[in-house]
Image: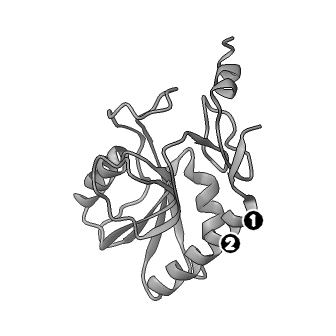
Amino acid sequence: MSDVLISAEEIEAKLEEMGRAITEDYQGRDLLMVGVLKGAFIVMADLARHVDLPVEFDFMAVSSYGAATQTSGVVRILKDLDQEIAGRDLLIVEDIIDSGLTLNYLLKSLRVRRPASIEVAALLVKGGIQRIPLDVRYVGFEIGPEFVIGYGLDYAGKYRNLPYVAVMTDEEAEEVLGQP
């Protein structure tokens, strides 16, 4: 399997730290955690266990990749929120932020609904490749531009269940796609 970039233990410790900061920042507020599917479901579940507040959950599904390893730049909302967000404090939970295009589109589409606040928590941020400057309040780890899998991150729908984050090799990608 690929080279482990961030171990399960490192992820757990970082999510605990992020959870403490979120608990402190949102005391007495109406927090709605919004997971961006599919990748963020694992991050959000584990992060939420470290947030010591009454929290509600909702999910959105957006697409900008397809089966590629780089964003297409075209964003589509596949599943919208089920709840009204006007006046609510939103915390968008992402597994990874790379170009920033998808998240920027998502933030713009949510701001017009007049939430009280919107902040972002991301397990991973790829350094140096953002096309759009973003303010990510809670960052787990900054990584390089390599393509990573595990802990919610997939390649062609596979590997989300790995308990760690690993760099995917070209050989592994070819194997998944059934190419020589």
Q: Which residue appears at 68% of the width and 72% of the height?
A: 13
Residue 6 place in picture, x, y as percent: 67, 56
Number of numbered discs present? 2
For the residue pair 97 and 6, the one nearer the viewer reads as 6
**Vertically, is 180 above or below 116?**
above
Residue 154 place in picture, x, y as percent: 61, 38
Q: CA distance from mark 1 to mark 2?
A: 6 Å
Q: Which residue appears at 37% of the width and 47% of the height?
A: 129
**Vertically, is 135 above or below 2?**
below
Look at label 1 and name its amino acid.
Answer: Glu
Mark 2: few, some, or many residues within 10 Å (few <14, many ≥20)?
A: few
Q: Which residue appears at 55% of the width and 39% of the height?
A: 147
For the residue pair 47 and 123, the one nearer the viewer reads as 123
Q: Secondary structure at mark 2?
A: helix
Residue 84 place in picture, x, y as percent: 36, 61
Look at label 2 and name its amino acid.
Answer: Ala
148 vs 25, left or right, is right
For the residue pair 59 and 177, the one nearer the viewer reads as 177
Residue with the mark numbered 1: 9
Scheme of colours in the image: one colour
The residue lying furthest to the top in this view is 180
Q: State if disc 2 and disc 1 touch (CB < 8 Å).
A: yes
Q: Which residue appears at 77% of the width and 37% of the height?
A: 1
Q: Which mark is residue 161?
A: none
Query: Residue 2 appears in which quarter of the rendering?
Result: top right
Residue with the mark numbered 2: 13
**Vertically, is 137 above or below 148?**
below
Mark 1: few, some, or many residues within 10 Å (few <14, many ≥20)?
A: few
Query: Residue 86 appears in which quarter of the rendering?
Result: bottom left
Q: Secondary structure at mark 1?
A: helix
